[in-house]
Image (cartoon, rainbow, N blue to C red):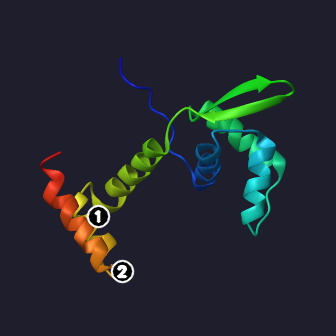
């Protein structure tokens, strides 16, 4: 049976999911407080609630009622979200080319000798995996 396609995460969805992945299980209030601690532009609790309901609908979160609160946890790991995001970027911006995407990432950037050595090692071992 094929895996059901799930929605890609928007920037706001990703912000919420990062908290869920970090904490494991959260309430709307947990997310609301954590987000507003690090953001200059504060958001309302109702906005967080709407986004979290959407994440349930989209298949990213599950919701369980315990006592008088709903607790949310991730149905998919961060790797799945990052993979989808990078895959979409690769197709949209680089016509599906891994080489062009990597060239762009390395262009006009500061890269250390250690990072270059790490990249060489990754490439040298790529065929072995």
Residue at left offset 60%, top offset 47%: 22
In whole angstroms, how far apart are the C-alphas of marks 1 and 2? 14 Å
Image quadrant in which you'd find residue 55: top right
Q: Is residue 119 above or below residue 87?
A: below
**Count the marks: how many?**
2
Farthest top residue? Answer: 1
Residue at left offset 69%, top offset 40%: 52
Farthest right residue? Answer: 68
| Residue 109 appears left or right of 102 | right
Q: Secondary structure at mark 1?
A: helix
Q: Secondary structure at mark 2?
A: loop
Q: Mark 1 or mark 2: name the one nearer the start of the chain.
A: 1
Marks 1/2 in contact by CB < 8 Å: the verdict is: no
What residue sits right under mark 2 in the picture?
109
What residue sits right under mark 1 in the picture?
101
Q: How many neighbours does mark 1 have within 10 angstroms: few (below 14), some (14-19), or many (20 or more)? A: some
């Amino acid at each position: 049976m094929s895996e059901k396609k799930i929605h890609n995460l928007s920037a706001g969805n990703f912000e919420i999911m990062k908290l869920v992945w970090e904490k494991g299980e959260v309430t709307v209030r947990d997310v609301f407080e954590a987000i507003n601690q690090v953001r200059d532009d504060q958001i309302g609790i109702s906005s967080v609630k709407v986004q979290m309901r959407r994440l349930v609908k989209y298949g990213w979160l599950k919701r369980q009622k315990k006592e008088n609160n709903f607790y949310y946890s991730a149905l998919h790991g961060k790797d799945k979200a990052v993979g989808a995001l990078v895959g979409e970027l690769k197709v949209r911006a680089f016509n599906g080319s891994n080489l062009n995407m990597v060239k762009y990432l390395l262009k006009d950037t500061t890269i250390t000798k250690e990072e270059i050595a790490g990249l060489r090692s990754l490439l040298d071992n790529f065929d072995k995996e």
